Amino acid sequence: MTQRTTSPSGNWSAKVTRESFALELEEGIFTWKDPKRIAQSLKKSADTSTHRKAPPFRSAMSMLVFYINRAGKNLDENQKRILEQAKDELRALYGKG
């Protein structure tokens, strides 16, 4: 059985979002109301990162999906809709859609 590492508050997913070594995210990115701005910021972070292990598109999309999944039922429906739209914007920016 493996043991999960948690931050002092027990909220390990918030710690990952704040302290991700792979991507340097702009503060509050997942609270923004503009899906295109979110996607552009994620793309910029992924494209310029020298620490990511996956290609830029996968890194950016993974961080976005990670946040949506970890926020889960606590994520406001309107913000969840915005973040889902940001996934489509991210695909378009990388020519994947």
Image (cartoon, helix red, strand yellow):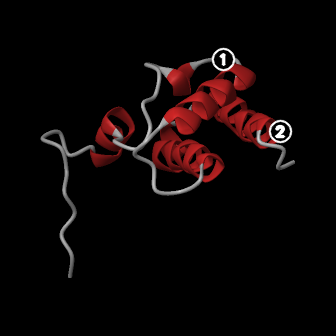
Label 1 packing within 10 angstroms: few (<14), some (14-19), many (20+): some
* Quarter of the image where one finds residue 95: top right
Mark 1–mark 2 Cα distance, whole angstroms, equals: 18 Å
Q: Residue 25, can we see it?
A: yes
| Relative image position of residue 63 (x, y in whole percent) | 52, 45
In depth, the one of 41 and 55 nearer the eye is: 55
In front here: 86 or 74? 86
Q: Which mark is residue 66?
A: none
Per the rendering, the mark at residue 92 is 2
Q: Is residue 68 above or below residue 33?
A: below
Q: Under tag 2, what secondary structure?
A: helix
Residue occupying the point 77% across, 42% down: 94
Q: Earlier in the sequence, mark 1 or mark 2?
A: 1
Residue 31 position (above or below residue 45): above
- Classify 29 as above or below 14: above
13 sits to left or right of 81: left
What is the total number of numbered labels drawn onto the structure image? 2
Quadrant holding the N terminus: bottom left
Which image quarter: residue 50?
top left
* Image position, residue 87 (x, y; %): 72, 41
Q: Residue furthest bottom?
A: 1
The amino acid on which the numbered mark 2 sits, given as a three-letter code, is: Ala
